[in-house]
Amino acid sequence: MFSLKVLTAVAAAFAAVSALPTEIETPVGSGCVITNIDQVSSVTSSCTNIVVSSLTVPAGKTLKLQLKTGTTLTFKGKTVFEATQWQGDLMEISGDKITVTGESGHVLDGQGAKYWDGKGDKGVKKPKFIRIKATGGSVFKGLHVLNCPKQCVSLNSCDHVTLDNWTVDVSAGDKNNLGHNTDGFDISSSTNLIISNSVVKNQDDCVAINKAQHVTISNLKCSGGHGLSLSVGMSKTSVSDNTVTDVAFKDCTVTNSDNGIHIKTHSDGGAGVIKNVSYKNIHLSGIRKYGVNIEQDYENGKPTGTPKNNIPITGLTISGVTGTMTGSNSKAVYILCASGGCSGWTWGVSITGSHKDNYCKNQPSNVKC
């Protein structure tokens, strides 16, 4: 016979167990760790705390991480993308209110050296590396991106997203001048975006903005590429697709690069606008071609020397821009505006060491060339 005291204790224990929640999230380490591409669909559809651990992604496959609202995703160890000639994205991350981080020592390796041929987009087929489509205050922090085959990080249709403390390292592509079109961050169709405290080492634009509103880029360290860029006007169908407004670059450095600041509009596209863009406290060093290059004459991806006013540049602020040039053909400032195409600028540029005189045409009257 059990004593009354024992029976009472058993009953209390049973009641406590019965009171536990019936739905308990599966902890990381028990079904929410991705170590094989075949696990991706089931894990992302059932877990909100996910680890991608030492994953090898088969050639020709996209690591598509479509995350549930509020998910935390952590990369651990080396994520390697096997190589083949194709034009997909190696990885796509999407979701609302998500947090994506990397453990210390992790790396996302695109194995770019297996693609690089010195021709970039025009050579053998190469995939873009990472595409992000996120919303709702999503945060991507502390990621280490290595050796992109071509464009590294594409931000599309993002709203209220922060990227902080990234390292994008394609410096191995400098060898024999093989790496090309390795843009660091490409931004299109996005709003309320922050990129901060990050490093980009590459052979093309450190940042390139095509279509965006309310973007802040701060404390970015760029080297080896084409600088802090806007490239606007490639769409022939919609003014909104050719619009960049309320964008701020501040407290950034650009070193050992072709350009420091580059703004180009495409005269063979449709109408559009660049408005209220600022570059403040930007330090340049070892710039080979142009310190500040603003031109309204791109067609078929190249400058023509004949500017057009389909995309006016208004409310531009370039102030506290300092630094040095190098190279026998370097110019501190090159401005080629169409008649009436540029107005309402604020200007404060002090760049030394250029080997050729500045060139300016149709710039606002307060811009001293």
Image: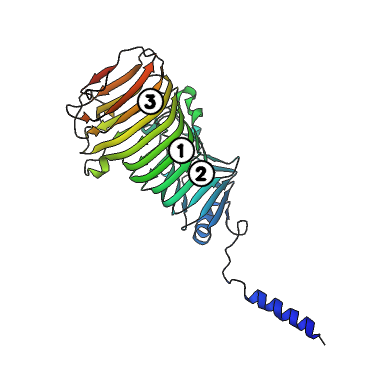
The CA span between labels 1 and 3 is 19 Å
Which residue corresponds to the image point at 42% horizontal and 45% vertical from the top-left?
131
For the residue carrying disc 3, how many other residues have a C-alpha within 10 Å: few (<14), some (14-19), or many (20+)?
some
Q: Would you say the residues marked 3 and 2 are in contact, meaning their CB atoms lie under 8 Å apart?
A: no
Q: Amino acid at mark 3?
A: Gly
Instruction: Name the spot of residue 176 as percent of width and height, x first.
Output: 47, 22
Task: Say which of marks 1 and 3 sits in front.
Answer: 3
The residue wearing badge 1 is: 196
| Nearer-N-terminus badge (3/2) | 2
Which residue reaches farthest bottom?
A: 1
Disc 3 element? strand
Disc 2 element? strand
| Nearer-N-terminus badge (1/3) | 1
The residue wearing badge 2 is: 141
The residue wearing badge 3 is: 320
| Nearer-N-terminus badge (2/1) | 2
Q: Considering depth in this image, is 103 or 340 the residue closer to the camera?
A: 340
Q: Quadrant of the C terminus?
A: top left
> On screen, 123 above or below 132?
above
Q: Is residue 174 left or right of residue 104?
A: left
For the residue carrying disc 2, how many other residues have a C-alpha within 10 Å: few (<14), some (14-19), or many (20+)?
many
Q: Would you say the residues marked 2 and 1 are in contact, meaning their CB atoms lie under 8 Å apart?
A: no
The CA span between labels 3 and 2 is 28 Å
Q: Quadrant of the N terminus?
A: bottom right
| Residue 127 location, quadrant | top left
